[in-house]
Image (cartoon, rainbow, N blue to C red):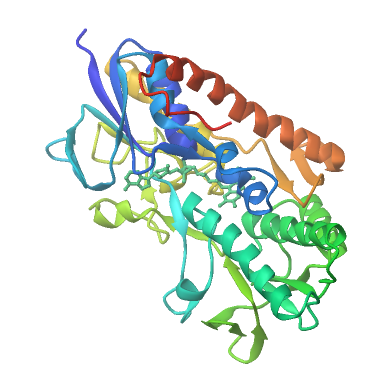
Amino acid sequence: MQRKRVIIVGGGYAGVQALKVLAHSDLCDVVLIDQHPYHYLQTEAYELIANECSMTRVTIDLLALCLSFGDHVSYIKDTIRTIDFESNHIIGQTSGHSYDYLLICTGSRTAYSNATEGLREYSHGVKTLPSALAFKQQFEQRLYQRMESEGGCCSEPFNVVIGGGGLSGVEIAAEMAHYIRVFHQDNTLTCDNIHIFLIIPHENVLEGMESYLITQATKRLLKLGVKIINHSRITSVEEHGLILNGTESICFDFMIFTGGIVASTLTGELKVEKNKKSQLIVDKFLRIPSHDCVFAAGDIAELLETTGTLLPSTAQSAEQSGVHAAHNILALIQGKEMKASDIQMRGMMIALGGNYASVSLLGWIRVSGILGHLIKTVIMRSYRYMLHLQCKKGINKMSNPKSHCGF
Ligand SMILES: Cc1cc2nc3c(=O)[nH]c(=O)nc-3n(C[C@H](O)[C@H](O)[C@H](O)COP(=O)(O)OP(=O)(O)OC[C@H]3O[C@@H](n4cnc5c(N)ncnc54)[C@H](O)[C@@H]3O)c2cc1C
C-alpha cells in the first residue's frame, strides 16, 4: 500500500499525542507543522511564572521529538495562514504543503472582548510562552521598582488583579499569592502590602466544576489572602486601573486576564461551520463535516462527551481527541470503519500554590493538600518525562548539538 502523507498542524497536547500514534504506523509519512519549535506545557505555566521552574521545564523540542521516530516523521516551523480544502493544500507563511490527510490542532487563545476597552492593551496573559515569560519578568521588575521607590518598604499597596475564575485564573492567583508570601518571608525588606484580587463573573470560582473542588479552592485562596470579588465584570481597563460593573474602580500595579478562550486565529480563515468561540464543529469521528480527509482535535474543536454534553477545553480532552483522530485517520487509510469518539473527563487537578493541590480523579479519589500536590506532580512529570525520553532518541540523531529537549 502506498504511504499516505498526513499533516498535523499544531504541536500542543492534541498534536503531540496524535503524532505518537501516527509515527508508530508504517502506513504514512507524518509532517508536524508548528509556528514554534517547542510544545509549550501550558498546564505547568503557573510554576514558571511563580519562579518554581525555568523555561526548559515547560517546553519539549518538536524537532528532536519528530526525529526520534525516524525518517518518515518530520517537523516544519511555519505559521499556517489558511487551508484550501478543495486541493488538499495548506498555505503557510513561508511555504505551502499538500496532504492526503490533515489534522488541525492549533489550540485556542485568550478571549479578549472588544467591548472591554483597554483589556488587551493593559493586561498580561499566560497562554503562550512569550507572554508567560514577559509576565514573569515584568512582574518581578515592577515589584523591584516599587520596593526601590519606597526605600525598601511598600507602604503604598501593591495590587495584582487577575480577571477570570476558571482553572488558569485560580491556579495563577494561588501560585502568586504563595509566591508573594515566600517572597515576603525570604526577604529582609518589609513588603507585605501586596494584594491579589481575583475578579470573577459568577458566585464561585471554577464555575461548572464539582463542588468539592470549588470549596477546596475557595478555602485555599482565602487562606492565602486572595480577595475574591464575585458577580463582577470588568467593563474597562486603563494603565493602572479598571472599572468593575460600570461603577466601581480598582487601582492595580499589575493585571492578568484569563477570562475564557476562543479558537486560534486560523479558524477565522476557514469557511467551515464554527461555534460562538470560533471552534470547529466536528462529527462523532472528529472529522470536519463535508471534508472527508480533515480532522480537528483539542481546543480548536468543539468536543462533546458521548452524552452530547460539551467538554471543557482542557489538556486531557485535547490529548484524548488527538489520539482518537489519529486512530481514525489510520482506519481510513486502511479502509476500515472509524470509531466514534468517547472522550471522558477522568478528573481534575488544581494547583493551589506551593505544595498544595486539590485533586478529584475517577469520580471517587478526592484529595487536597500535599498529597494532592504529589499526585498532580507525578502525573504532570510523567507526561513530560515520557516525552523527554522520546526526545533524547531524536537528540542523539541530530547533527546540530545545540538543539535540545526541555525537561
Ligand atoms: C495557565 C493554564 C493552566 C492550565 N491548566 C490546565 C490543567 O491543569 N489541566 C488541563 O487539563 N488543562 C489545563 N489548561 C488548558 C490546556 O493547556 C489546554 O486545553 C491545552 O493546551 C489544549 O491543547 P491543544 O493541543 O488543543 O492546544 P495547544 O496546547 O495550545 O497547542 C496548539 C499548538 O498549535 C500551534 N499553532 C497555533 N496556531 C498555529 C498556526 N496558525 N500555525 C502553526 N501552528 C500553530 C501553537 O504554537 C501550539 O503549539 C491550562 C491552560 C492554561 C493557559
How many numbered marks, from 0 up? 0
Instruction: Please provide percent x and percent y for residue 237.
Output: 53, 81
In this rendering, position of residue 343 left or right of residue 53:
left
Image point 66% across, 31% down: which residue? 381
| Residue 362 in view | no
Residue 249, position as x, y percentages in the image: 65, 88
Give the side of residue 201 with respect to residue 21, left or right: right
Q: Residue 12, relative to residue 16: is it above or below? A: below
Q: Is residue 200 above or below residue 242?
A: above
Extreme residue toward the left, this view: 87
Q: Residue at x 33, y 10 (%)?
A: 26
Residue 88 is at least partly visible in this image? yes
Instruction: Tell which residue pokes out farthest to the top in this image.
Output: 1
Identify which residue is drawn at 78% across, 77% down.
154
Q: What is the x, y in percent for residue 308?
A: 52, 44
Locate residue 50, reporting x and y percent. Answer: 69, 53
Q: Please tell me which residue lies in front, 30 or 384.
A: 384
User: For the point 86% across and 64% down, which residue is it?
Assistant: 188
Question: Splitting the image into 4 quarters, where does residue 217 fall?
Answer: bottom right
Q: Nearer the viewer, residue 114 or 72?
A: 72
Q: Quadrant of the C terminus?
A: top right
Q: Nearer the viewer, residue 79 or 89?
A: 79
